[in-house]
Image: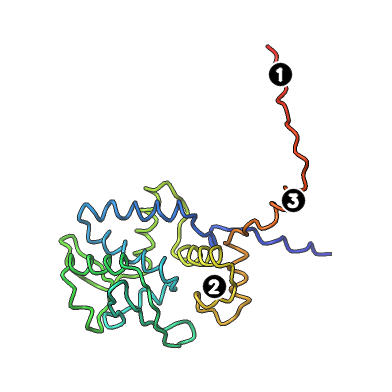
Amino acid sequence: MARPTAPRPYQTEKTKAWTDEEMNAILDSIAGEAEQGSIHALRDYAVTLFYLYSGLRRNEVFGLRGNDIELQDDGLIVRYKRKGGKQQRREVAQADVREALLTYLKKSKRLSVLHTNDSIWTRHDRAGGPGEPLTSRSYANNLKKYAAKAGMRRVNIHQTRHTYARIIFEDSGDLLETQSALDHESQATTRVYVQTVAVKRDKHSGRIAGRIRRRKVESPNQSG
């Protein structure tokens, strides 16, 4: 008889979500290079914030064109084609992602791209000049370098989306809200995400603690 299938691990490297500490360590690593004037790092910082604040998929982020961005006073609205081909507009009401995008575009002298059909993210030559559209592979390679400087290994792009899902579900505890945030058609897909990356919050140990009779446990004397 065939052996039963082994249970799915809590988190594999592929499905891993970053902890808050890991997320901030990576952002700090990118920001450190950006503060030294690197256009590549300025761009990558903005891309990473787009990922973390919106939870968009790889092709949705790298498919963004200038006219897909609507600037707001405190954030922006992103227009993208979600999985399945449906057009979607998503608000990201955070000033720092707006600032990061504008800082990158100003530094690379591409601010005018916001009103065109050109790609938002491009590669840059050694002099900082814009080139071909940035590919997810190039960004992924850069992300691994930033993560390595932050002391992290086996980092991949999709972990940004898992991190987004983790934070939303841990804070809301609402599967439907998390499903909507991730643009999932099926709640079953969202449930897999939640079971894989979210930490189930403790709602019950306080009840147990109220029934445990406390007694002080003395440490045994050590001889010698």
Badge 2, how many Cα within 10 Å: few under 14, some, many 20+?
A: many
Q: Are marks 3 and 1 in contact (CB under 8 Å)?
A: no
Q: Which residue corresponds to the image point at 42% horizontal and 46% vertical from the top-left?
A: 151
Q: Are marks 2 and 3 in contact (CB under 8 Å)?
A: no
Q: Which residue corresponds to the image point at 27% horizontal and 59% vertical from the top-left?
A: 41
Looking at the rendered structure, the secondary structure element under dot 3 is: helix
Question: Residue at label 3?
Answer: 208
Left or right of residue 195, residue 147 in this image: left
Q: Amino acid at mark 2?
A: Thr
Q: Which percent across, then down, holds residue 178?
A: 54, 73
Q: Could you tell me which quadrant the N terminus lies in?
A: bottom right
First along the sequence among labels 2 and 1: 2
Q: Which mark is residue 72?
A: none
Q: Which percent across, then down, holds residue 195?
A: 63, 65
Looking at the rendered structure, the secondary structure element under dot 2 is: helix
Q: Nearer the viewer, residue 100 or 107?
A: 100
First along the sequence among labels 3 and 1: 3
First along the sequence among labels 2 and 3: 2
Q: Nearer the viewer, residue 110 or 78?
A: 78
- Toward the right, the furthest residue is 1
Question: Residue at label 1?
Answer: 221
Question: Residue at label 2?
Answer: 178
Q: Is residue 125 above or below residue 24?
A: below
Left or right of residue 180, residue 210 in this image: right
Q: Amino acid at mark 1?
A: Asn
Q: Which residue corresponds to the image point at 31% horizontal and 61% vertical from the top-left?
A: 45
Q: Amino acid at mark 3?
A: Ile
Left or right of residue 220, residue 51 in this image: left
Can you tell which of label 2 and label 3 is closer to the viewer? 3
Q: Which percent across, then down, holds residue 46?
A: 31, 65
